[in-house]
Image (cartoon, rainbow, N blue to C red):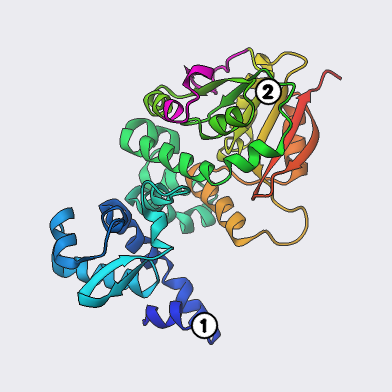
Amino acid sequence: METNNLYKNGVSSPSATLGQMLAGYQVTQLIYVAAKLGLADILADSPKNIAELASIVGADSRILQRLVRALACIGVFKQIEGGRFGLTDVGDYLRTDTPGSLRAVAIFSGEDWVQRAWGGLLHATQTGQVALDHALGMSFDQYVARNPLVSDGLDQRAAANTAQVADAIAASYDFSDVRQAVDVGGSYGTLTAAILRANPHMTGILYDRPPVEQGARQYLAQASCAERCKFVAGNFFEAVPSGGDVYILKSVIHDWDDPRSLAILRNVRKAMTHTARLLLVERLMPANGEPSFELATYDVMMMVLSNGCERTTDEYRSLLSTAGFALKRVVPTGTLFSIVEAELDDA
């Protein structure tokens, strides 16, 4: 298949369109290897030839030549005079230090365990079982707990994804009457930091699993928020810290099926005062019409990994009601995410 023609010269027929779709896994793996090797960081200062790149990353120069050439064909790198390769605007987002970097996302997407989980999609479709459970022989949370490197990679991916939208989310909601926010399952605190930067009067509690603590403290210090945000380690299936005026859960509930989502929401409810508010920051499925490709594939990803899903507003309304909340409004953020605001329902 001539991937170069498909990506650079446009798609001219239905068969070529399908051919491009079928090449998707190949492209993911090409970008994954480039991200794992840190090629974009190496090329950030100046173009280099294959011998230089191979020497720096410890790779086979013949294989690396073919990989980088393929990446140049799809616009991640570019070949210039003297047999050297440099970065494109697209490839720049594989750099570690680029604002909005997608390197962690690229690494997550190509990891063996993720690919194996997706390989269980046919089984899941035929049986209704979770694809990852079938492929790996254990649940998502069990696998993460047993593999610290996987856990760290997930947190880096979460931080990278949230960094794309954090400022927009922080600017979309009025936090003027909020003294303290509790970010439940907030990973490194990317969203918390954005909210605190935009609202100097606020403090925060960042609540997540114990292994996240070191990375979270480092991130909060780099974001100049460490003095205004306390990290608390715990398990949101067991309890949630009290003391918040708002409780923020970004991309948490979509990870889980209804029973486990309800367990989390009920623990949040126990921690809240009557005046506190709950903010679910989630991608909302349209009630009518087709979702975007990005939203639809996120929905399938949740199904593959943990039997979670993206929900409609009415589905969130029902879920919240069962957990003892009343949905008050949905606040758009100008991104794929919306803020679902809820209060305790004492009726």
Specify whether residue 115 is in view: no
Bounds of the magenta segment: 219-242
Callout 1: SS: loop
**Quadrant that contains the C terminus:** top right
Q: Where is 107 relative to 317, above or below? A: below
Please report whichever mark, 2 or 1, sits nearer to the chain's N-terminal start.
1
Q: Quadrant of the N terminus?
A: bottom left
Residue 159 % position (x, y):
47, 39
Of residues 327 and 171, the one drawn nearer to the viewer in this rendering: 171
Give the image location of residue 77, x and y in percent.
34, 67
- Rendered position, 157 above or below 185: below
Q: Which residue is mark 1?
A: 11
In the rendered view, does 239 fall on the left or right side of 84?
right
Pointer 2: what residue?
Answer: 246
Nearer-the-camera pick, 134 or 333? 333
Farthest residue to the bottom: give it. 12
The image position of residue 118, as x and y in percent, is: 43, 55
Q: Mark 1 is on which residue type?
A: Val
Q: Is residue 246 visible?
A: yes
Residue drawn at point x = 49 percent, y = 17 percent? 227
> Residue 26, located in which quarter of the rendered image?
bottom left
Amino acid bearing label 2: Val
